[in-house]
Structures are given as structure tokens and as C-alpha cells.
Amino acid sequence: PPHTYVTLFLVQVFYFKITVMPEEKDEIYDGCTVVVQRGTYMKTCRVLQGRTYAFGKRGDGQFTLNIDGALGCPFGSSFRMERMSNKLFSIHKTEELNTCLDIVKEGGEDNRDLQDDGRSQKLTPEEIIQLKGSGLTGKEVIQTITENSTTFKDKTVFSKEKYVNKKQKKYGEIITIHRPSIRLLSNMYYTLDPLKIANLRVDTLSQLLCHVNVQPGGSFAVFESGTQGLVTAAMLHRMGTIGHLVQVYHGNHPQRDAVDLMNFTTKELETLSFINFTKLPDITPQEEFATNGTDEVKELTAEQADKELIAEDTHCETKEMKADTTEIIEKPSSDTKSMKKEFTRPQKFVRKQEEDIRMSSTVLQGNVEGLVVACRQYPNNILRDLLHYLKPGHPFVVFSPYKEPLMELFMEVKSQNGTNVHLSETWLRHYQVLPQRTHPDINMSGGGGYLLYGTRIIKD
């Protein structure tokens, strides 16, 4: 009967939530990582009581913020910035998101007579900076700017609203504190500098996860370099607390910046293990690719790798807070020592390196159900070495910001150990949806990288 299927479905969902999805705190707590948004500007920071954080561009646009007022408030809450000193602000939760659109009252018929020559604003940049530092609210600053614009009164209502909204993003006093998510982190990295994540756009990342069929209970391997750990964090988020995820890295330490920003619990991090490329276990594949050029990947000797593993702990300790993209400024107080004793930093690695290597080797020798390679460098040699650990009939995905190496790899994989091989590039464009003004955004991203995906087979 239909009600039987509904009952079974609900039981499965309930079981999935209990066994796979960890409990998440709905409120901002001391020691968690948050995404602070002001207009279109976003930055991450770790909430530590009694500390202030630097936001904005260096120079006159930079300010420091004390976010102690956010502790105990739900994620996604909005706060009003209140000036404590020249460039130091505190925050207080607010339910009223006041806009400056009441400045717009009437407008002209069209903008045909307006000239964008840069001379319409009477105030100089220095005078506007002085207004900001004089204690005026954001709305008062915006109102003063519009009053000193010679062309503002002749603009249409639509143009006035657009102008005011643009200024409000720059001078507004409302910030929103979000729980970190893969989409937020991806958009933040891509907006700040796409090259830092090898042009990996959020739509390309979602397709990558779909093609490799990441799901709880599976065993997967990922090689990631040059994407700030976004791919590893996205796969770990989908897997929850069940399964195995092995991150293979090349160099001194794995890239896991995004992993550290996602507030993963210890139980979730137990799913993830790391292994250096030079420590990969031996395996006798039934069918191999040609091994020409594989020595380019394994350029480190075993002795160097051992030294790296010994030095990795100290290296990670010194760079632990570099995952946070904000500058932390300690607030001088007599309770600083007591705060350091009370606050315990989240454990970054849940296992020792020897245990990580042993666990990763066991998972790889048992063959994984999905393989992901996401890197800026030449991926062909990396895939040759890692494809032996993938079960036949299971998917692999290779991401690269360049199509030329993937075109070469396409022909090689298709002729030897792959089937259903595809090479794709996605095209993304955002739309503005407003009354009488719905149209594609004028600016769009130039590219989100390329994906090569297929299924491994063993040919006779």
C-alpha cells in the first residue's frame, strides 16, 4: 500500500539523520568559524571572546570589529555596527533592516542628458572619508553624498535606487553572520581571487560531486592541489560520518583550508585521512597505463618524505590560524591568560601521521568507489598512478583550469582504461530579477574550469 512506502521512506530518512548527519549547533558559539557579510563583501573569522578582527581593504577602508555581541545568537542573524572609537565597532543584534531607499522620492523621465564624466560629485574622496570618521551613521553619509551630487535629482527612480543600493553596500552598518557552507566559501574565494581556487566555480564543483557519486558509506580518494581544500571539504560534507575519504597530497602538507573553516566535528573528521604521494601503497593492477613520465610526480625521495612527515606537525601548528582570512587583533585585558586556558582550539588532525598512512593504505588497497583529481598542474601523470586504486566500473573525475591537458588525457583514457568518457565546460550567468528590470547581469565569470569524467574498465 502507498502508506507503507511513505512509512519506509520516513524511517530511512530518520535513520540517515541519526547515523550520518551530525548534530549542528544553531547558535554562534565561542571557537566556531563564521562568515561575516557586509553587502557583497565576505570574510571568515574564528569567534574568540574578547578579540577584535580587521575587516575591509587596508588603509582608510579598513576597520576593526568586536563580535562578542553575536555569541548565543542564531546563525544568519543581522547586527548593527556601533562605533566605539575611531575605527573600532561593536555589534548588536537587530531585527529591523533599515534601508536608505526612502531617500528616493521622485525622478526624471530618462537619463539621456546625463554624462558620466566623473565631475558630478562635489565632495572629494578625502571629505567623504572625513564624513565617515565624524560619527555620522551610514544613512546620513549616503544622504550627504546624494545631496552633493549634481545629477542625482535628474535620474530616473530606477537609477536612483540602483545608486543608493550601491552606496548602501559600501557605507551600510548592517552585517550578517552566516554558518560556513560550501556555497558560501566557494563564492567568497571566487569573488576575492578566482586564481586562488584554480577558477573552480560553484556550479563546476557541484557537477564534479555529481559525476563521482559522492554519498555516505562509500570509500573515495581525492588528489587536490591549488583549490584551498574546497573539493575535500565538499566531499566530506556529503559523506557525513559514514565512509572513508582519502586525500592524497604532494608536498609538505595537505591543502585543507576549507576543511578547517567548515566547523566539522571530530566524528566527521574521522572519516578523512591523509597520505603523501610518495607513501602510496604498492598494488599490482590488472591493466596499467603507460608509465612514461610518472617519475615527474614522485620526484621526492623516501628520505625527504620522512623528513616532511616529521616536520609536518610543527608546520601545521604554526599555520593553523592562516585558514582564517581575517586578521586577529588581541584586545589587551587582564583576562587574556585565563581566556587562553579556557579556550581549546579544535583538533586539526584526529590521528597521528603513521595511523593516517596506515588507514589510507588500507582503504586504497581495498580499492575506492570514486576518484577525484583537482589540480592546477599537469594531471595526466597523477591520474595514471591513482587510477589503479579505483574499482572497475566506478567513476573518476579530473578537474583542471586548462583544457589542453584534459584533451590529451581524454584520448589516452578512452583508448586504454576508460569508457563513457566526457570532457565538459559549464557556462554560468546570473540574472537580476526585479520589477520591470529582469535581465541577465552585465558582468559574468569568464570560466569555471573543465571536467573530464568517465568510468574505469579493464580491457582484455
Image (cartoon, grey):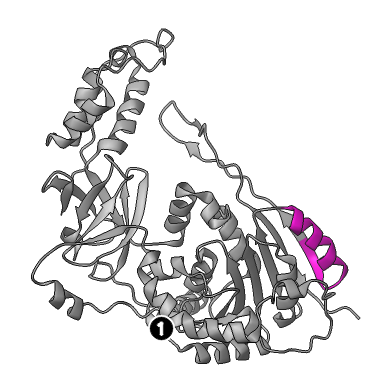
Report the residue at 57% width, 52% height from top.
199
Where residue 22 sits: x, y (%)? Answer: 38, 78
Q: Amino acid at mark 1?
A: Lys
Q: Residue at coordinates 74% horizontally, 81% vertically from top-left?
A: 388
Of residues 295 and 150, the one nearer the viewer is 295
Vertical comparison of 9 with 144: above or below:
below
In this rendering, position of residue 201 left or right of residue 343: right
Tag 1: Cα neighbours inside 10 Å, few (<14), some, or many (≥20)?
few
Residue occupied by mark 1: 267
Residue 322 versus residue 300 in the image, above or below = above
Find the magenta span and give its range: 403-421
Which x, y percent locates residue 157?
33, 20
Mark 1 lies on a secondary structure that is helix
Front position in the image: 101 or 444: 444
User: Would you say residue 300 sits in the magenta stretch?
Assistant: no
Query: Hey, which residue is sitting farthest right in the picture?
Result: 460
**Quarter of the image that includes the C terminus:** bottom right
Q: Nearer the viewer, residue 149 or 299?
A: 299
Number of callouts in the render? Answer: 1
State which quadrant residue 46 falls in.
bottom left
Residue at the extreme top: 113
Image point (23%, 17%), residue name: 148
Is residue 239 shown to the viewer in this render?
yes
Is residue 102 something that shows in the picture? no
State which quadrant residue 341 falls in: bottom left
Residue 188 in percent (x, y) is at: 43, 52
Q: Quadrant of the N terminus?
A: bottom right
